[in-house]
Image (cartoon, grey):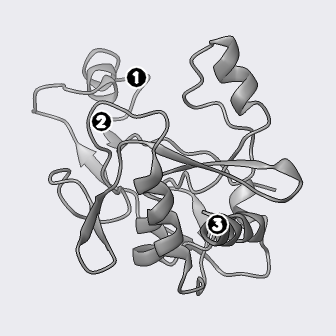
Amino acid sequence: MPGAQARADYPVRRAEAVSRDCSGRIARTAACRAARYFPDRASRRHYEVVTYFADLSAYSYALSGRDDDLAEQSGAVNIGWLGASHEFPVGQAPGWLVPGILKLVTGGLVNLMRGYHSCHLCRRPHWPPIEMKLGEREQVLLGNGEIRVRGAGGMLYAAPSLIAHYVAEHSYLPPDGFIEAIREAARTG
């Protein structure tokens, strides 16, 4: 059973994958190059490549290999690494969840990346980055790092900063343990 379907009591949504046809264009991606040079092994139609990990699967995305990094993040699980071609649980999230996530984003991202990842579930351009409002004045940029939050029993949740957008705009409903960890972090932080 895939992690994204772990909450069988909630409906799931399959996002439309964004497809492109690279025939007749300059090959800019590995899939296009493969289609051009090895047409028998690759299709000329391909999907936008994004990082997908099932909810509650072991975290392994941006481990640097340093001993302190591995020790700090050992046992972390993935939350909210949605893929356009994968189902994910949907539902009504508590009203405090998105502001709680955004407070964690502003409190310090980990695994900062060069540049911004855009939402592959939306049909919006890759630039400018996704912004969300926190409070009346603060704008929060999303898509360039991850948040960490510790839940009950010491469970460490690792989520992309775009999880706030996924919850607000695509009705993604994270697992209950993550929701409770956000509630606790908002209460104590």
Q: Name the residue under label 3.
A: 182
Q: Residue at x 50, y 53 (%)?
A: 83
Q: Indicate which label's residue lies in the foreground, 2 or 3.
A: 3
Category of crowding for the residue at label 2, using alpha-carbon neighbours closer than 10 angstroms: few (below 14), some (14–19), many (at least 20): some
Q: Seen in the image, is 14 located left or right of residue 129?
A: right
Marks 1 and 2, how far apart at CA: 10 Å
Identify residue type, mark 3: Ile
Q: Position of residue 9 (x, y in %)?
A: 79, 82
Determine which residue is flagged by label 1. Answer: 40
- Tag 3's secondary structure? helix
- Please tell me whether mark 1 or mark 3 is closer to you in this view: 3
How crowded is the residue under tag 1: few (<14 C-alpha within 10 Å), some, or many (20+)? few
Task: Indicate which disc residue 44 carries.
Answer: 2
Q: Which amino acid does label 2 sit on?
A: Arg
Q: Are marks 1 and 3 in contact (CB under 8 Å)?
A: no
Q: With 137 as the anchor, is 108 left or right in this view?
A: right
Side (left or right) of 79 relative to 121: right
